[in-house]
Amino acid sequence: MAKTTDERSDLTDLVDYPRETLDIELKDWIDLGDKVAQAKLARHIAALANHGGGYLVFGFRDDESIAPNRPTDLSGYSRDTFGRVVTRYLTPAFQCDVQLVQSSAGLIYPVVRVPSHGSTPIGAKADGPHDPRGQPQGIRAGTYYVRKPGPKSEAAMGMEDWQPLIRRCILFDRDSLLADIARAVQPRSEPPAPAIEDRLKTWHDKSEARWRAIVEKATALRWLVDIGANHCQLSYIILSGTGIAIPARELQHVLEQVNRDVRQTVWTGWSMFYPFTRPEIAAALHPEFDDGSGVDVLESNLIGDGDFDMSLPDYWRYAVDGRATIIRPYREDRQRSVEGKGRPAGTWLSPETVIRETAELVTHARIMAERYDGSRVAFRCTWRGLAGREIDDFGDTYWSPARHARADQRTTIGTWDVPVLAANWHEVVAQLSCPVLSLFGFSECGSELVARLAPRFIKL
């Protein structure tokens, strides 16, 4: 049975504002028992996997309108259904995740998340049902499908189709090899060079000042504690000998693509630097400074949205020269968490969340740096509002109780080569996040704990 979510998430954006892209395929309601329909689904799934992952969104026509003839029963849209399709037609086999997502209008839509291929592409191992002329329908054995402009799911033909696919396979193998090496070699963190540290701190501080000015004007904001005193801010800057220059017109699309890749490591349904498309909260370009000067910066402000019982009032900025920052109040303080945990807002902190969100930042930075030939990444991470909080966690995760922080804030910094961020990200995350938890006497934090928690970082 697919999981159902009625809370706002990245997936809600897919059904509130449906669109077809290379990583999103809209599908009308289909007969899931029809063999030809299954073969066509397998072709789309293979192409999305070979594209690096993506989504099948059911209940919409190709023109992005809502499809008629909605089924009364959506139970057939399940992991088992799509698992059988993958097992029958594709190799190597893999698992798709299925979620029933409620739109803002209250309608439920099945969304299938297709993961990326690994060290080998996904190929078709069986033909679809044959037509009267003996030709396979939907999918052909021995074919590798990719996403092409249209968007369409078609057979890979020339080098323009194969090159990005081969590159991802090589990167996957490289990361696995580097991870093996990293088990024997400890990454060495260095403090940022003074000029870099000053530049990152200035970006970090000025972004916070801009955020505080926005918060002051957010009269519709409803949050259980003072977010000005209770939040984390996570920033990085990509370093390169020739400088980073992301074309402003491409930045939003690039962040969408990188967000998809980050989800192979961390995905809770509420991603960092996710460019929503709903007009009132859509990310928009701004000059870096209020006087109109500075580089172009893509900015997303969810603070004015008002309703945060289940979502988060994130604020983030991404500059075209590779600087990024996100300011996020603690998940522990939202209404849904208070009701689920039975603890007042502002009284506890989740070690798993601290570590997971740091891991998401490090992963995002690494993927962006690889895309734009960055050599190193410098980080600056700040947590505020810690004094008086106690270690606790969501769900069934248990930590020994009665560990409180007396200090109110902690800032960590560090700079690492990009290959280290790929090879030993567990240790990098530990070095950035564990000093926060040490304020609580949380002595078990380290790279081994990060590695142990990592499988839990994909919640959907």
Image: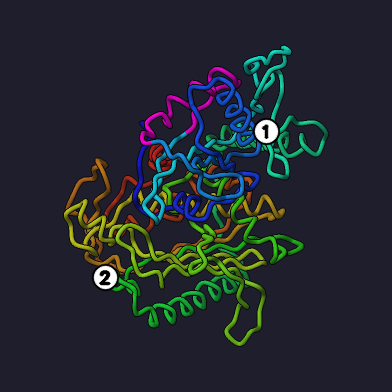
Picture coordinates of residue 168 (x, y %)? 67, 37
Which amino acid lies under the numbered mark 1 shown in the image of this protein?
Answer: Cys
Q: Quadrant of residue 133?
A: top right
Please say if 303 is above or below 18. below
Q: Which residue is mark 2?
A: 225
Please say if 270 is above or below 62. below
Picture coordinates of residue 138 (x, y %)? 65, 24
Q: CA distance from mark 2 to mark 1?
A: 46 Å
Picture coordinates of residue 351 (x, y %)? 32, 51
Which residue is rendered at x = 34% and y = 73% of the image? 221
Q: Quadrant of residue 108?
A: top left
Task: For mark 2, give the secondary structure.
Answer: loop
Packing grade of label 1 (10 A; few <14, some 14-19, many >=20) is some
Please say if 341 is above or below 345. above
Q: Is residue 155 magenta?
A: no
Q: Is residue 398 visible?
A: yes
- Range shown magenta: 72-96
